[in-house]
Image (cartoon, helix red, strand yellow):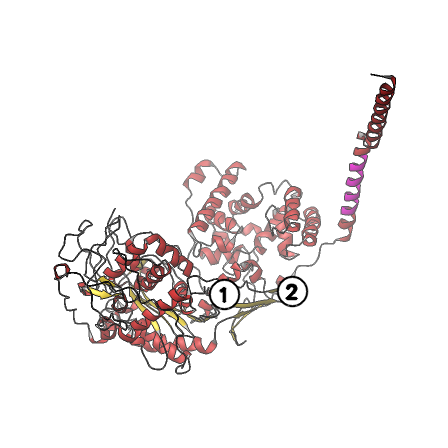
Amino acid sequence: MGRADARRAQAQESRRAVKSGGIRRLFTWKKLLGTVFGIVLLGMGAFGALYLYVDVPAANAMAERQSNVYQYSDGTVLARTGKGVNRQIVDLDEVPKKVQHAFVAAENKTFYKDQGVDLKGTTRGLFNTVSGKGKQGGSTITQQYVKNYYLTQDPTVSRKLKELVISLKIDQQMSKDRILAGYINTAYYGRGASGVQAAAQAYYGVDAKDLNVSQGAYLASLLQAPSQYDWATATPTGKKLVKERWAYTLRNMVEMGWLTESEKAELKFAVPQKPKPAAGMEGQTGYLVEAANKELEKQGVSAEDREAGGWTFTLTVDKKRQQALEKAVDDQLESKLDREGSRVDATVQAGATSVDPKTGKVVALYGGEDYIKHYISNATRQDYQPASTFKPLVLASALENESTTQDGSLIGLNTIYDGTSKRPVVGSDTPFNPQNEDDRSYGPISVQKAMNSSVNSVFAQMIVDVTPAAAKETALDLGVPDKNFPERPAVSLGTMNASTWDMAGAYATLDNHGRKVTPHILQSAEHRDRTVTPEKPKREQAISRASADTVTKALTGVVDAGSGSAANTPAYDAAGKTGTSEDNKSAWFAGYTPELTTVVALFGEGDGGRKQVSLTGTANSGRANGGGFPARIWADYTLGALDGGSGKTFDLQDVERGEVPAPPTPSDTPSEEPTEPEEPTPSDKPSETPSETPSETPTTPAPPTTSPPATAPPTSPEIPPLPGDDDGQPGERPGGNGAAPQ
């Protein structure tokens, strides 16, 4: 290296040393500590100023709580709730000591030792509020008392900071017992109950002084999510979570020395009593308010927010149509029942949901005979099978997937199937041979006629041709819930669970040319401090217009010349489908006009709602199938809702007629002749007599192409026939869902 190079290297090294030294001089440990200390001092100063600035306020507006108003769509008042707070203050010494400890164990086991705040939890809550994650837990009992009694539920930074300061002051000014008493007397427990005394009555029918440890642990656990954890309405997940919370509370009590292990081991979960409806909820009012409240929670208005009062909730329900629905049920069903003198009539429950197929607005809803007498809403309950009202969705899936029969024929209204009763399906790994109604065999039959007469053997084969998985996917897209919905041939007969609300959404989507319709009952929610605009449901195309319109065409045949003839009238253009579940436990009629979609169902309910029983013998009418009472209620209501009728007709496009194969050789023609159906009782004739004339018939009669002839050996194992019901549905076998075990 030359001298010049050496000098350059030395100069570069000197510059690096100077630069490094400058950085070190700028960022010394002393300076860093000084900066941090300065920030801490500023924060302490700001908090000190805030501490001096924020006083403990007077009690919040709970004492001045307003009622909530529920309105029909036209602004007419439906109901007022929460006129007074359901709360009775009790002294802490009236609450058993172990119950007091249960609340502390559930919410804040360090309550008796802390300073009234949880800085870590508060910091997390502030961060979540700023970052938009909403309200979070982590508050002490003192903080929750301050929020309930002095502040609001608003998830804002300013409210959280005030809560922190006031909690510190309250902890210095009040005893722990006084704070705990304030907390359990102001907390909201659900069922309209604020305070432990009201909660004890609402959930267990006892005074707070008589609560046992298990009951107290449940009420304490309930505070985390009152609506989600209410045993009467909780989902299986909600029940699981609240039992886990209950067990967590007891473990904490043991840890804190408030309960022994042996005492804990003897405790059993205290299942609450059924809720009692509030006054003013008689008739259909309670069902409408309940449906609105459930939707409010989905829209972000919690029960706690709602119970604070001051809201005006406007429903989508049309007052005139609601009255028409109630009148139709009274005239066509209730007036014919002897609920006091007939054991069968006493079990009958009716439910209905009526939807505007263009908007999804629920314009009328029938939840039961009286909300005070029957708390479960028959409109939204999902514990019964929709039966053959599911068959149109099987056809929709076949059309949407361009499915073909076993011999390759495109499925449409004119496609020929084998309508032989108890015919084993072909092409399925799961054997299935459903019986038709009255065990009637039809031989070669078009899809249209099979829909008219609800022929089980045809749709059992069709779902195999489509595949149960594809049919389920279509059904879910249309709005059927995924409840007890196995992918087996038996689901072609509607053996999953669904409500009238669910099926109204699916049929409204068909009515709306395949564009998705999601039923909703909340139009707006306005408060003196804020307005909640309900989220508009997505309106994507669930299935093509051609598929939906083809199904509509098929269902007009059911009304014009099939099992739904009780709904037929020249006053309006109608499409619909009947359904009757296994053992006649439920009976359905799902139908629509161009302007209105309505699903009506009857349910046989015994043992206080814990048992499903047969509807056979309802009003001395024999079999209460879907083409009877439900179809007549539907027709009466629709006529009234449409002001006596409508000139609008279905605008159907690209209806799929299907392929009609060439006739087979004579040797392949089934030799079995259709048997005559049993003579129905006079009151059931309109719905029980299968029509022999489909609305669409092929130009050339053709025998079945989807399976071997009836005289040939079956390709799947023969299964002993199962007992049928009004729609000829199978009974349940071990292994479930009406299908033979695999």
Three-letter code for the amino acid on which mark 1 is drawn: Ala
Q: Which residue is mark 2?
A: 529
The x and y percentages for residue 645 are 39, 82
Q: For marks 1 and 2, give the CA distance.
A: 20 Å
**Image position of 107 (left or right of 711):** right
Res. 178 visible in picture: no
Relative to residue 40, is residue 740 drawn left or right? left
555 left or right of 320?
left
Residue 154 in the image: above or below residue 172 = below
Q: In this rendered view, identify the residue nearer to me: 416 or 725.
A: 416
Region of the chain picked out in magenta, as a range: 33-47
The circle drawn on residue 292 is: 1
Please tell me which residue is depicted at 31% across the width and 59% down the height of the picture.
494
Task: Place residue 567 in its image quadrant.
Answer: bottom left
Locate residue 268, reporting x and y percent.
41, 45
For the stretch drawn in magenta, the main secondary structure is helix
Residue 380: quarter of image: bottom left
124 in relation to 351, above or below? above
The relative height of residue 211 versus residue 369 in the rendered view (above or below) is above
**Residue sitting at x 20%, y 76%:** 682
Q: Which mark is residue 398?
A: none
Regarding mark 1 in the picture, which secondary structure is present there?
A: helix
Q: From where the camera sits, is residue 740 visible? A: yes
